[in-house]
Amino acid sequence: MSSRMSSVATVSGAAGSRSLRNTTRAIGVAALVATVATVILGLWVTPPAKVQGTLVRLLYIHPPVAWVALYCSFGLAALSSFLYLWRRTRSLFWDRLGASAVEVGVVFTGLTLVTGSLWGRPTWGVWWTWTARLTSTALLFVLYIGYMALRRVPATQEVRARRSAVAALVAFVDVPIVSFSVDWWQTLHQRGTVLNPGLTLKVHGSMAWTMALGFVAMTLVFAWMVLVRYRIEALGDVISDNELEVSLAERWSEAEQVPAAGAPLVGGERVPEPAGSGR
Amino acid sequence: MWRDALLVAGKDIRIELRSRVALWQVLPFAVLVLVLFGFALGPGPHALRTAAPGLYWLAVLFSTVLATQRSFAIESGEGTRDGLRLAGIDPAGVFLGKAGAVALQLVCVQVLLGAGIVVLFGVRFDAWWLALVSSVLATVGLASAGVLYGALSAGLRVRETLLPLLVLPIVAPVLIAGSRAWAAAVTGAVSSGASWLKILGPFAAVYLAVGVALYGPLQEAA
């Protein structure tokens, strides 16, 4: 019974202080407002562009999403992995933060690829081209999916944290090499295509404001998602820590109750009932 | 560190020489991949010859996955890894030793594959030295990155499926740079081919350094 009480106590402890939850909520509200404002400005207030027409509206979303995916999240993941591996700052806080950042980053990378593809089809005439940026983004996507797969492998928290931190750092080191090599590969072997986006659009007026707002909105969404994901991660750790203890406690209390209720005896032995936890 | 590396590499190579797994499984697999590529592309000599550098490096990449898996399978015995740690061997030495052993196996694979694309695909090299230098650099990079991830997934029940997913995207730059350099070595466009060494070299150096630095914490985590 006591172990159950303590587990309840740590669950609420890991859920974070009230101020953290309030911050999360405030950022969430701000993110929602900014996103809605971007949508309204992007879809109705801003004019269609001269060359791209109404397609330009995708550019209020696509670059901000890519910014979050490639810089905010993977940068944060690398930083927190480094801080985890460095002995002086080692704490599970960095591990969870890194994991949350990667997970959100993978979602945003996927969105980057999808929105880019949606834009590319009417603009370039194809869903996919082997340009350097597209290729290296796709490689990054797979790279960090690998990180998530590694994280899913059952292990103790410490082991998982260390493993994930190394994997995140190794993946991050690969980012510049991948982008360089793909860049060269592309420039040496795919020149003078029609697909080359020479349409450098000049952004000004309401369009510039909307794009800037898009960056703010997506960064806020990123921050909110990471905070929420962090909390889930922390709670999950607490639960997996305590699950065994709680089930054991339940099992013991069942065992204590069974004889009073007249347990079935087989050959003088009590038939063990399976524990209710289903593990 | 270097003495430890030699010890570990010697141990791994001895195990390979005695068990012959690399000889009878990894090498035939590499050749099999080449033959299958031939089937996939059809018997036309021109298509095969243009695709040969890429196919060669793809086969090397697959063999890297196999070799690293093997390199950590021999450590999966009861208490083997603890023994290695208890022996007071520098983690960096273990890393360098294992990477060295894998690299040596990759050299064997590449000699066979190189002969394979010359014989089966009819490839002729214009610039031997370029192919050779890029191979050496790529081998160092592949072995280091492979061993790093091999150690990450060592002892996991899902390692067979997890390792390729982790390693192959990481070594994609080696595939790109290696096959471009080899294509240049075949056509004789040395100056454009040599610029790919600027990717293979740093890749090898970076993953050697990362491995030396991170193998300690990694070994504790396994």
Image (cartoon, rainbow, N blue to C red):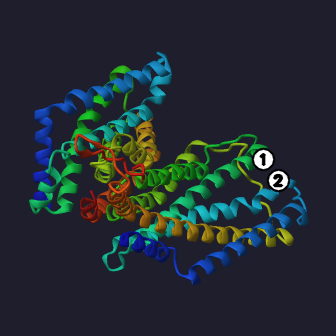
Q: Nearer the viewer, residue A156 or B4?
A: A156
User: Which label belongs to residue A123?
Assistant: 1
Local crowd size for mark 1, using a 10 Å CA cut-off: few (<14), some (14–19), many (≥20): some
Image quarter for residue A258? bottom left
The chain holding disc 2 is A
The answer to whether residue A52 is visible is: no
In which quadrant of the rendered image does the C terminus of chain B lie? bottom left
Q: Give how far across and how far down residue A132 sits, in percent.
A: 58, 50
Q: Are marks 2 and 1 on the same chain?
A: yes
Image quarter for residue B130? top left
The chain holding disc 1 is A
The answer to whether residue A241 is visible is: yes
Q: Is residue A114 left or right of residue B168?
A: right
Q: Give how far across and how far down residue B23 sits, in percent.
A: 20, 30
Residue bearing the label numbered 2: A55
Q: How many marks?
A: 2
Q: Is residue B173 left or right of residue A182?
A: left
Q: Give how far across and how far down residue B10 sits, in percent.
A: 11, 47
Q: Amino acid at mark 2?
A: Leu
Residue at 76 percent of width and 40 percent of height: A125
Q: Residue furthest top?
A: B43
Residue at 55 percent of width and 65 percent of height: A229
Label 2–label 1 contact, CB within 8 A? yes
